[in-house]
Amino acid sequence: MTTQRRSYETGHKPKCLVIVDDTAEWDRAVYYASRWAMRAGGGVVMLRIVELEDQNQQWLGVADIMRAEAHETANEALDRAAGRVNGIAAITPERVIREGDAIEQILDVIEQDPDIAVLVLAASPGAEGPGPIITAMVQAVGSFPIPITLISGDLSDAAIEALS
């Protein structure tokens, strides 16, 4: 079941969901999302997905340490991205950390927040392809519940400003 979007209803404001990952182009998506939020009078929701390797129960202590380290790394990445959003648009973004499959977590975050109006992803300009999330999302894009904006990882700040 897809939650009805409420982004532009009274008492709501549109939000842009942006993925903060370890790719080189994450900053392009954050830059565009920040500019979009500033122009739309909306907000930014930053999502960091932690994909933990198979965790064997007999090594529960090690798994807990690995999870704690992954969340610490996620918070550091979100701190950097939040500083970037604030510097661009003078807004404080929402922060979400999720564990598991990237597409499932993205869809769940969208389902849980009816104010999310658009997903922004940045595509790698390199020969290796657009990036792992975009590659995985290709199969789900036809039934996606909100618009998706893809930003080229090659765009400069000035080019993004001109587009947003």
Image (spheres, helix red, strand yellow):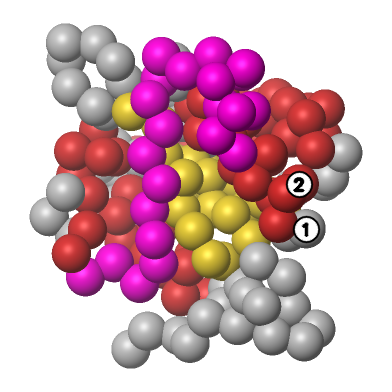
Please provide percent x and percent y for residue 129: 18, 22
In the rendered view, tell whether residue 130 sits above or below residue 32.
above
Give the residue at x 80% y 83%. Answer: 11
Note whether residue 71 is visible: no
Identify the image quadrant of residue 116: bottom right
Residue closest to the far left: 139
Side of 157 relative to 67 (left or right): right
Q: Residue furthest front?
A: 162
Assign the C terminus to one quadrant of the image: top right
Q: Is mark 1 on a helix, strand or loop?
A: loop
Give the image location of residue 28, x and y in percent. Answer: 52, 25
Q: Please name the residue that numbered disc 2 is placed on.
A: 38
For the point 73% across and 27% down, which residue is it?
Answer: 84
Residue 120 badge? none
Nearer to us in this view, 65 or 123? 123
Which kind of residue does numbered mark 1 sit on? Gly
Residue 82 coordinates in the image, percent (x, y): 74, 35
Q: In which quarter of the image is the N terminus?
A: bottom left
Q: Is any atom of residue 156 visible in this view?
A: yes
The reply to whether dot 2 and dot 1 touch (C-beta < 8 Å) is yes
**Residue highlighted by disc 1:** 41
Q: Residue 71: which quarter of the image?
A: top right
Tell me which segment is drawn in magenta.
Answer: 143-164
